[in-house]
Image (spheres, rainbow, N blue to C red):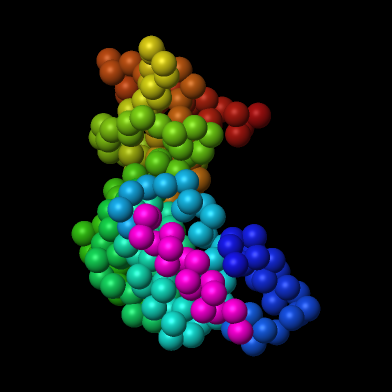
Amino acid sequence: FGPIMAELAIQLVDSGHIKKEFILEAESDYIGTARKWLVTMSKKETDEDYYIYSVLSLMGRLNTKASNQLLLDFLSAKRNYLKQHIVEQLLKNKQTVPASAIDILAADPGERTSLYNSLEHNKKTSLFPKKYLTQAYFAESNMYDLANDNEEASAITFIKKKQAKYRGRTYNFYLYKIRYDYDEESSTYLGIAGGYDAGGKKLESTEPLTTMYDEEFDAERIDEMFETWLLKLSEEEEE
C-alpha cells in the first residue's frame, strides 16, 4: 500500500472506474504505511518525502476523521513543500490548520505565494500572517521562484527598491543579488522583481517583469544595469 498504489487509486477514482468506498476499505493499511514513514520524516529531511506525497494526496481525497488526523500529524515533516501540500488538503477538507504551520510556510519565500493562493481559494486569507502580507515579501517570493527555476540558487540577497517608468507608468522594482555556487567557483547576477504597483498596496506584480540580468553582477553598476535592461526592454517592444 505504497505510493504507486496510492497514485493508481487516485487516477481510478478520478476517472470513475472505482468508487471512493472501495479505497476506504484499505484506509487503515495506507495509514499504517504512512505512519512508518512519519517517524523518520519528523526527525530529518529524507528522499522518502517524494514517495509519501501521493499517499497524502489520497488521504486528502478520503476526507475521514482518521485520514485528516494523519495529515495533521504529517505537518511535523521537515520539508516545507510537503507541509504546503498537506495544508492544501486540510483547507479543501475544511479542517482547522495550525497557525504554527501557516507561520512556517509564510516565512518561506519558496512557499509563501502558494500558501496565500491556497488560502485565497478557500476564502481563508485572514489566516495569512500580517507580517508577510506586504509587496516586498511577495516580490521576494517571485524572485525566489525565478532564481530557483532551473537550478537552486545558493543565496538571494535583497539590495534595494527602485521606482521606474515602464510604458508610461511608474512601478516598484525590487533588486537582488543572486549567487550560484559551483565546485570551486560561483556566479552572481542582478535579480529584478517587478513591476509592482507604485503605491505598494498590491501584492502581485501589475506587469510581469521579473528577470535576471544576463551579465555578471557588478555592485558598482547596479543602477546602470537596471536602467540598461529597462531601456532595452522598452526598445524591443517598440520594434
- Can residue 42 be seen here? The reply is yes
Whole-percent x, y for residue 88 in the image: 45, 69
- Can residue 125 be seen here? The reply is no
In which quarter of the view is residue 190 placed? top left
Q: From the viewer's perspective, is residue 228 above or below residue 145?
A: above
- The magenta region covers 25-41
Q: Residue furthest top?
A: 184
Residue beneath the point at 39% across and 78% down: 69
Instruction: Count up the numbered dots.
Output: 0
Q: From the viewer's perspective, is residue 182 above or below residue 204?
A: above
In which quarter of the view is residue 82 placed? bottom left
Whole-percent x, y for residue 222 in the image: 32, 22
Whole-percent x, y for residue 64 in the image: 48, 85
Q: Quadrant of the C terminus?
A: top right
Q: Looking at the image, which is closer to me, 233 or 132? A: 132
Residue beneath the point at 53% across and 30% down: 233
- Side of 166 relative to 108 (left or right): right
